[in-house]
Image (cartoon, rainbow, N blue to C red):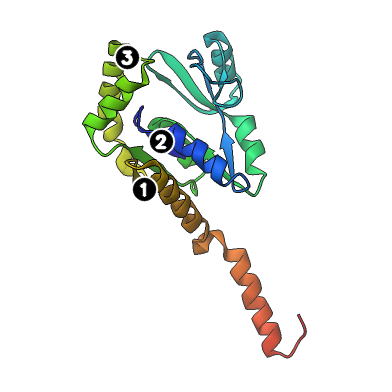
Amino acid sequence: MLSGFAGSGKGTIMKELLARYPEEYALSVSTTTRQPRPGEAEGREYFFKTTKEFEQMIAEDALLEYARYVDNYYGTPRAYVEEQLQSSRNVILEIEIQGALLIKEKFPDTLLLFVTPPSAAVLRDRLVGRGTETPEVVHSRLSRAIEEADGCEAYDYLVINDDLDTCVEDVHRIICSERNRMRHRLSEIEKIKHDLKQLVKGEQL
């Protein structure tokens, strides 16, 4: 799961991972009640819902997690994630901290990465540079970032997004390394141990 301050570039990092390694990654698309930004498409960046539709999903327990952020709902569709988990690719979720921690409780092996710009000033400049946020929303997002900074210690890795290319490759290496942890590959080592015993006994594999 990839989280980070609004304006940290986490969405861009995810798009680059998918573009560079399409066979290795699958994106879990979140649901939101906010309006689409220019260039965003239904089912690609988000599943866009009305507040009524979103609250119906809450009532039906159709979300793994959800939160209200800057006057809009954001959530992770249960059915979509479960479908993606059936593939052999790394499934990436871009969600807020409280939602990430809730999913971590349900899926303990989940890897948490927190993305941040190199400084608070750079974060402010990126938010303003978008040109899509009012000064009030920028202020709200900066205020929210203070709260998020108090919760990111629970994450497994901190990723500094200064240079995009370097950052994307750092994230890719972290995920690849995590997949090779022994606890994730016990079945493979058990097979090798079994085959070794057969070889020592003189049996054919």
Q: Residue at 64% of width from left, 39% of height from top?
A: 84
Quarter of the view holding residue 168: top left
Question: Considering depth in this image, is 180 or 66 the residue closer to the camera?
Answer: 180
Find numbered disc 3 in the image and state the secondary structure of the residue it sits on.
Answer: helix
Badge 1 amino acid: Tyr
Left or right: residue 163 versus residue 75 is: left
Where does the image place residue 181, in percent across and percent down from the top left? Answer: 49, 61
Say what secondary structure mark 1 lies in.
Answer: strand
What x and y, as percent, mark residue 177?
47, 58
- Mark 1 and mark 3 residues within 8 Å of each other at the beta carbon: no
Q: Which of marks 1 and 3 is nearer the N terminus?
A: 3
- Toward the viewer: 135 or 181? 135
Give the CA separation, mark 1 to mark 2: 11 Å
Disc 2 packing (10 Å; few <14; some 14–19; many ≥20): many
Disc 2 designates what residue? 3
- Front residue of 87 and 120: 120
Which residue position is annotated with label 1? 157
Mark 1 to mark 3: distance in Å? 28 Å
Residue type at mark 3 is Val
Say whether marks 1 and 2 touch (CB < 8 Å).
Answer: no
Q: What residue sits right under mark 3 in the picture? A: 137
